[in-house]
Image: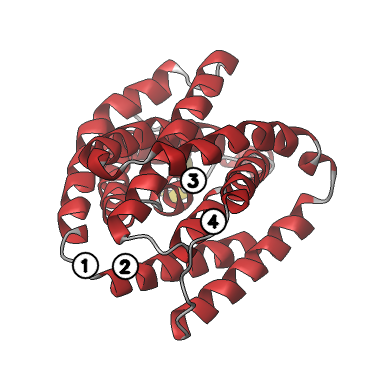
Amino acid sequence: MAMRNIPLNDIRALINSADKLLYYNGNVYRTEPLFKDFIDMLTPFLISIIFLLAGFIQGMTGFGSALVAIPLLSLFLDIKSAVPLCILNSLVITTYLSLKMRKNLDRKKILPLCIAAVPGIIVGSTLLKQVDSDIIKRTLGASLVGYSLYSLFFTPKTRKLHNFWSYFAGFSSGAIGAAFSAGGPPTIIYTAMNDWKKDSIKATLSGFFLFNSYLIATVHAVSGLTTIEIFTYFMISAPVVLLGTVLGNICYGNIPHALYLKIIFAFLTLMGIMMIV
């Protein structure tokens, strides 16, 4: 693309514009179009690399793809594009993991979480958005960091929790997720506190996130948030995120139960810090 010369007399007008300027041989050039074209050309490649990493993380832990993908995607994509794209890719991740962990999927463990998440989503979309979201988000983040650090340096005793806590975790995840797009921690903590094997923890998380992902993806499609451009990016990144998930799941098989719980709480600490910041 040829650069258009701009007379020096027009500098005052250009200073008030949002265009980036390059001075060369007494002329002023607009460099913003060239920079934008370069970024647009790299976008599919960058998206693929990001989702390769995101798929690997969730393949290994059972969660965390959004933790990796959203901050990185938002560097060059609008957040309104990054979130639907992340949700679409999460369909690939959670579908694969649910199929892979199907022997450990237990309806009695997953169903209460899914049932309670629906009214939680409604509450999160109405009540929580009417209050000061920053205060609530930072309070939740601080609580999450505190609990996760405690669990990292000490070993909380796992136990068989009452069914009430599964409904509470599902409702909380739905409400927080709808209000702040960070609804995973309540369910993750609930599964980690139970005296379950690591396969049961990962299978329950995968089944619950599968339900949430399909529900949110449907809402995005109906509301028009999922555009042709986003779907095109999804078609490009889907094979790569699947590869990352497969590789992460292979690594998961070599992780002892105690180390797996430490990894969970380390990622929860990071999520809490991001909520505070």
Q: CA distance from mark 2 to mark 1?
A: 6 Å
Q: Residue at x 21, y 54 (%)?
A: 248
Q: Is residue 172 above or below residue 275?
A: above
Q: How many marks?
A: 4
User: Tag on residue 38?
Assistant: none
Q: Is residue 213 above or below residue 25?
A: above
Along the polypeptide, which appears first: circle 4 or circle 1? 4
Q: Which residue is mark 1?
A: 255
Mark 4: which amino acid?
Pro
Q: Residue at x 30, y 39 (%)?
A: 93
Along the polypeptide, which appears first: circle 3 or circle 2? 3
Along the polypeptide, which appears first: circle 2 or circle 4? 4
Position of residue 35 measured from the top left corner of the image (x, y, whole percent): 40, 41
Position of residue 249 measured from the top left corner of the image (x, y, whole percent): 20, 52
Point out the frontmost of discs 4 and 3: 4
Point out the frontmost of discs 3 and 2: 2
Q: Which residue is mark 4?
A: 185
Q: Is residue 132 left or right of residue 157?
A: right
Q: Which residue is mark 2?
A: 260
